[in-house]
Amino acid sequence: MQAIHQPLHRQKQAEQRLSQTPGPNRGRKPDFRAMVQNKEMQSALGSGLLMLIAWGTAPYFGTLSIMLYIVAYAVGGWTKAKEGIETLVKERDLDVNLLMIAASLGAAAIGYWNEGAMLIFIFALSGALESYATERSHKDISSLLALKPETALRIEDGQMNLVAIDDLEPGDLLLVKPGELIPADGVVYRGSSFINQSSITGESLPVDKVAGDEVYAGTVNGEGALYVEVTKSAEGSLFGKIIKMVEEAQAEVPDSQRFMERFEGIYARIVVGVTLLVIAGTPLLLGWTWNEAFYKAMVFLVVASPCALVSSIMPVMLSAMSSSARRGILFKGGAHMENIARTRVVAFDKTGTLTMGTPQVTDIITAEHVDRTQLLAAVAAIENLSMHPLARAIVDQANMENITLQEAEHVQALTGWGIEGTINGVVWSIGKTDVLRSMQSEKMTGSNVDPDEHDVNPVKVSSEWGDVCSHLEGEGKTVSVVMADGELVGLIAMRDTIRPQAAAAVKKLEAMGVKVAMLTGDRARSASVIARETGVSMVYADLLPGDKVKQVQALRKQYGPVLMVGDGVNDAPALAAATVGMGMGLSGSGTALEVADAVLMNDNIEEIAWVIGQARRAQRTVKQNMCFAITVILALIAGNFLQDVALPLGVVGHEGSTILVILNGLRLLR
């Protein structure tokens, strides 16, 4: 028994490495302390505090007040001024940062210190909030890299040497002990074991591997030792390709960001050009004095500054993000809230997303002369010594039925088939249904389905075991054969259970006009059963991580923006390639959560329809704000040149429009 438990212990440690990678904070409220610790936020708040102190001291200490205003300008505007100057020098382009600083300095130049300081404070505060949101949207693949094995046992001249992964070459022979990570892509040269390759293929159940079968780097070996012949270098392995695909997908720049960058440059050029034209041209063309022309130009800089335009977007996005957080959906940046509003297809991973990700016993079929409880007790006693997920499902079923497990003797793994052991002198064997092929012609003398209240979804037994097995497998279930002293006495069927909210979630999405697809590494038969029960219309099965990326790209090309929902390492490339990637917070791997643009903290996929609706509402609000802000700016500009708008009135009108668009955005907090 000691020989059995030792490798299982190592396997458990390896599986914990896969499940305990770091992810974002789960179930916590927004971290306002971290927001205040943001340097840009500290600068903005410091600028606002100095502005208030300077305004309060102005009636009594004029010189001190001006000095405080100068410090407020420097504290709040330094970062933006630096960014604007860098853009001007390195890219030879103007941006809104430099324009805003120029407007504030222009106000100060004609004696309106407080108005200029207020402009800097509001702009700096908006920039700080945007910076904080952007930091959270940064995708980090450090957890994925942490899963990559660092060393391998290479067999050279009959001896085992510990070498670095990067030193491996195709043709090398490696020893992979029970419970260890497979260090490189290769083919099994000798040995047999089951491999947990959910990190690569997304398959919910481990896969048995024998000589000649392919294995992937980053997957977990089961209970048997394997000799693996390397077929690909570390860079060319499937695991290495996953990392590369994530990095490439993360480098993709959203179209909205490109548009805003172009708009900023054009807007800044127009404003600067008009300002210079007013200063230099109006005295010559309209006969204005230089003082009058300079005053008009400064008023123009103030009223044309983009505070209201900037506030049209971020307060709305942050409010929508806050209300989503209360529903258990966290976004890593405002841009992702904007993108999710355009969703036309929601692509779900199957295992761990539409389903719970753990197999459960669904059917126990027994021969006529066999007691169901006795069969389950014997099988569970033997499987209790195994860490295979199917074994754990059987043991959990026995525990749920309060069955006392006896001690099994002579337990041993049957290479490539299953496991066997002795209970009270009877040899019980549990394994694959391959044995049924040799028994297709044998009729059952009788059958029995115990009506015991603990039975799970009993299925009426047909005249042949093969027919029963085919029926169960047709329902997407994994079937194990049970034999006693060489006689076939029963079948145990297991299947990954569907999430309770899955069908309702799919129905709500389709009611909104959003198409629903399933992308999975599982077999087509299992996938079609889950799709039928959840109502998913588009099913793509037998997909490796690279295939999922290609399918996401195909869906984007055919239908439009795609929201990908997944939970595993294997979903990471597809999450990054989608318009918006959403990770499962409770059951998701650390890598999926780090790569995802949004995290469903409570795993309630029914909330996805709500958040798409909220994002669409936010998009409408942004459009309303921008139209209002542009209207006010144009009206103030026209008033400046036609009706001699005073600078204080221009500031009041400009800042008033800013406050209104912010309040309109805050409505989304409800």
Image: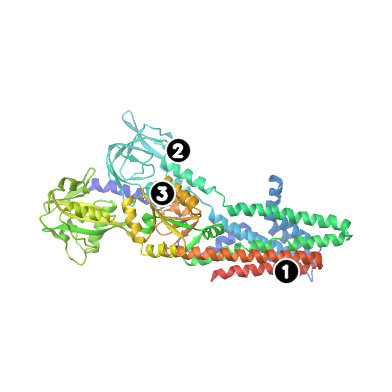
- Distance from Cα at disc 3 to Cα at disc 1: 53 Å
| Label 1 packing within 10 angstroms: few (<14), some (14-19), many (20+) | some
SS for dot 3: helix
- Whether residue 321 is visible to the viewer of this picture, yes or no, is no
Please state if 668 lies on the left or on the right of 545 as rendered.
right
Q: Residues within 10 Å of mark 3 (few under 14, many from 20)?
A: many
**Which badge, 2 or 3, comes first in the chain's sequence?**
2
Q: Secondary structure at mark 1?
A: helix
Kind of element beneath mark 2: loop
Q: Amino acid at mark 1?
A: Gly
Query: Image point 62% across, 57% down: which residue?
Result: 39
Residue 570, disc: 3
Three-letter code for the amino acid on which mark 2 is drawn: Glu
| Image position, residue 201 (x, y; %) | 37, 47
Residue corresponding to mark 1: 653
Q: Nearer the viewer, residue 256 or 116?
A: 256
Q: Amino acid at mark 3?
A: Asn
